[in-house]
């Protein structure tokens, strides 16, 4: 996304539907920064941005669970490919 913290597709949680459940990638802060806020250097803004990203993950999870869809949070090791971790 060209502007830090502007809503764009890459800011959304990474999800994958597998065997009737949805897996949500839990990124390490440095991987989130590389993906969503690479141009930002202000530590306070980065902390707030990451907190907003985590809140969005919880929100998506709550909606899915409210509709009876099981959700699994998958911790992605720093530097690991999130898509690979969700397989």
Image (tube, helix red, strand yellow):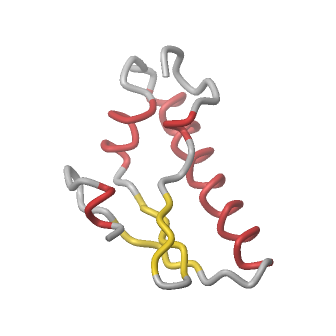
What residue lies at 58% left-to-right and 27% top-to-bottom? 5
In-image side of 56 versus 77 (left or right) = right
Q: In this view, does 81 lie above or below 73?
A: above
The foreground one among 61 and 84 is 84
Q: Residue furthest left?
A: 79
The foreground one among 17 and 65 is 17
In-image side of 40 versus 8 (left or right) = left
What residue lies at 68% left-to-right and 61% top-to-bottom? 60
In-image side of 22 versus 42 (left or right) = right
What residue lies at 70% left-to-right and 72% top-to-bottom? 64
Whole-percent x, y for residue 51 in the image? 57, 47
Image quadrant for the C terminus?
A: bottom left
What residue lies at 53% left-to-right and 52% top-to-bottom? 13
Q: How many labels does the image show?
A: 0
Q: Which residue lies furthest to the right in this view?
A: 66
Whole-percent x, y for residue 84 in the image? 26, 62
Q: Is residue 58 above or below residue 9?
A: below
Whole-percent x, y for residue 56 in the image? 65, 52
The foreground one among 47 and 33 is 33
Whole-percent x, y for residue 86 in the image? 36, 67
Q: In this view, does 7 lie above or below 26?
A: above
């Amino acid at each position: 996304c060209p502007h830090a913290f502007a809503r764009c597709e890459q800011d959304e949680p990474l999800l994958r539907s597998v065997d009737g459940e949805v897996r949500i990638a839990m990124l390490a802060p440095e991987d989130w920064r590389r993906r969503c806020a690479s141009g930002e250097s202000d530590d306070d803004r980065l902390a707030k941005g990451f907190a907003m990203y985590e809140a969005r993950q919880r929100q998506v999870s709550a909606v899915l669970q409210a509709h009876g869809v099981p959700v699994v949070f998958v911790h992605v090791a720093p530097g690991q490919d999130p898509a690979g971790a969700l397989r």
